[in-house]
Amino acid sequence: MSRAPLRANARHRPGSTVDRPALVTRTALSIAGSDPSGGAGIQADLKTFAAQGVHGAAAITALTAQNTRGVQAVHPVPAGFVAHQVRAVLEDLEVGAIKVGMLGSSEVTAAVAEVLASRPDVPVVLDPVMVAAGGESLLDEDAVAALVALVPCAALLTPNTHEAGLLLGVEPAQSLSQLHEQAERLLTLGADAVLLKGGRVDLGPRAIDVLALPDAASLALEHDRVPAVRVHGGGCTLSAAIAARLLLGESPSAAVSHARAYVRAALMRGLTDPPGGGATALLH
């Protein structure tokens, strides 16, 4: 389903006991898992929203025990309570964009899809989190089909090559031509746009992401590789930054450009002063 253009976040509630002025706060909502180390998930999303100048709200789908070295345990939040969190935010705050990250199970994915279907006016950036940087699974095997069914809710889908392969039922892309092909195939799942992250593909000194938009040839977005073996929270931050930039009224291509630059800058700071001893975490 296509998302309607963003509208001004202004409202007034007549009849309240306290007469309040119309609110103009720009709010982005993250639906994702929690990372106690602060580098990924909800914590990274809220930092990113703040850095982009928008108010951040959050609905937590799972508690994790993790740090930059890896994920030790995951404690899922019941699907009904996840939906309850999302509705509580949407009923009170003027949410202008939603980022969806780790969902964990088919039940949570279906519950989130039901709520999002009721708000087609709000653009959704879907980061289909399936595996952590250290290789730990963050999505039940039976939830992939439910995640595919959620894709039509997305204004922008942001998979890496492993996630794209799982969504399409094919092997991950290993070349530039395969990146383009799979990005364009992902569009057919129903998202309005797709950013296929190609950092895991060995294409020499330059890393390439591919942006696929409807009615146009897919675009290769190049950048110098950052000297980090593993990155903690890069995908979370990228999708959150895109959501914030869409909320601020930017086009998908402009939002992607600004978000990629933000992630690179935060990653370079993380390399200079790493907050942990494992994967490189971003410093916002």
Image: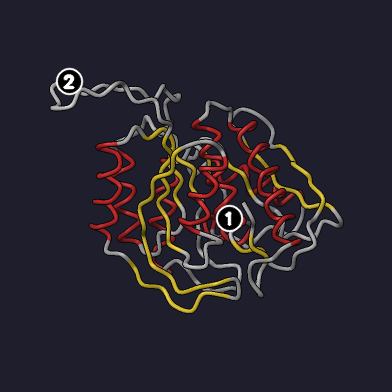
Question: Which residue type carries mark 1?
Answer: Ala
Give percent across and percent down for residue 10.
35, 22
Residue 78 placement: quadrant: bottom left
Tell me, for residue 14, which label it has, or none: 2
Mark closer to the chain start, 2 or 1: 2
Name the residue at the right extreme. Answer: 205
Give percent across and percent down for residue 274.
69, 66
Of 281 and 87, nearer the camera is: 281
Give percent across and percent down for residue 240.
53, 46
Q: Which residue is drawn at 50% across and 55% down?
A: 128
Nearest-to-viewer mark from 2 and 1? 2
Q: Which residue is drawn at 44% across and 77% down?
A: 73
Return the residue at label 1. Answer: 164
Name the residue at the bottom extreme. Answer: 72
Assess disc 1: are there few (<14), some (14-19) or many (≥20) residues with their C-alpha within 10 Å of its C-alpha: many
Q: Are marks 2 and 1 in contact (CB under 8 Å)?
A: no
Q: How far apart are marks 2 and 1 (CA)?
A: 47 Å
Tell me, for residue 4, which label it has, or none: none
Q: Which residue is drawn at 40% across and 43% down?
A: 29
Q: What element carries label 1?
A: helix
Q: Is residue 58 above or below residue 67?
A: above
Residue 104 placement: quadrant: bottom left
Number of numbered discs visible in the structure rendering: 2
Quarter of the picture holding the N terminus: top left
Give percent across and percent down for residue 275.
64, 67
- Residue 231 lies left or right of residue 158; in this view the side is right
Q: What element carries label 2?
A: loop
Question: Which residue type carries mark 2?
Answer: Pro
Q: Which residue is drawn at 52% across and 43% down?
A: 50
Assess disc 2: are there few (<14), some (14-19) or many (≥20) residues with their C-alpha within 10 Å of its C-alpha: few
Q: Is residue 136 above or below residue 254?
A: below
Of 260 and 181, nearer the camera is: 260
